Image (tube, grey):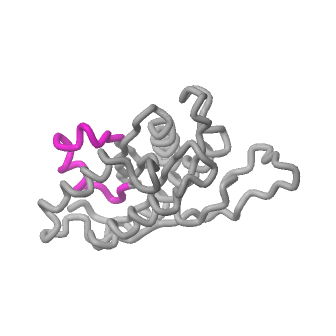
Amino acid sequence: MSNVVVVYHSGYGHTRVMAHAVAQGVERHLGSTCQLISVEDVDQHWESLHRADAIIFGAPTYMGSASAPFKGFMDATAAFYLAQPWRDKLAAGFTNSGCLCGDKLNTLLQMVVFAAQHTMIWVGLDLLPARSSIGVFDGQMNRLGRSLGAMAQSNVEQSPDLAPPPEDRRTAAHLGERVARLAERMGHPPV
């Protein structure tokens, strides 16, 4: 059993879809619970973050980095940085952009450094890249071929009902389930 929190920002709803997919993955792991927290509401939920076994970060990639509201959340953690309430908690991340590349790797790297500063343990994606010889992925996970975290690409003209595609949602759910399983295995006691 593990207690996982997903803290995220979503500007247009596509990253929120990913956050919900991650939460579904967490809850697929028997006995695990997941709480979704939007960065806009984080001030009411700091204790939930401090008590979590794992925290999964999610942000859209805008102009090659995490969105400004997500960066604001990161900066707000300076208030408790020295106390290290997140020490040895598991951390993972996901991001989404309108372009296939969209410099999403930079956003995940931001999250990794942020987690390291909080003395957290980063969990990457344990999926090999999807393979396609004709541009069709047939439902394969990790279609964007990343290891550091879950990445999604949402066609900007599509609503969150249609984008990101099912492969990216399944990849996000897989990441959530992996984090829940590892958190249980590590047996982190709440702070």
Residue 74 lies left or right of residue 175; in this view the side is left
Residue 43 lies left or right of residue 4; in this view the side is left
Q: Position of residue 91 (x, y in %)?
A: 39, 62
**Residue 31 visible, this angle:** no
Q: Is residue 184 magenta?
A: no
Q: Residue at x 47, y 62 (%)?
A: 106
Q: Position of residue 178 (x, y in %)?
A: 53, 58
Q: Residue at x 62, y 29 (%)?
A: 162
Q: Quadrant of residue 163?
A: top right
Q: Position of residue 23 (x, y in %)?
A: 46, 43
Q: Quick one: which residue is furthest to the right in this view?
A: 134
Q: Quick one: which residue is furthest to the front in this view?
A: 63
Q: Quadrant of residue 92?
A: bottom left
**Residue 167 visible, this angle:** yes
Q: Nearer the viewer, residue 20 or 106?
A: 106
Q: Residue at x 62, y 36 (%)?
A: 155
Q: Position of residue 161 (x, y in %)?
A: 57, 26
Q: Quadrant of the C terminus?
A: bottom left
Q: Nearer the viewer, residue 121 or 137?
A: 137
Which contiguous range is marked in magenta?
A: 36-55
Residue 167 lies left or right of residue 177; in this view the side is right
Q: Is residue 41 magenta?
A: yes
User: How many marks do you count on the picture?
Assistant: 0
Dominant SS in magenta: helix
Q: Quadrant of the N terminus?
A: bottom left
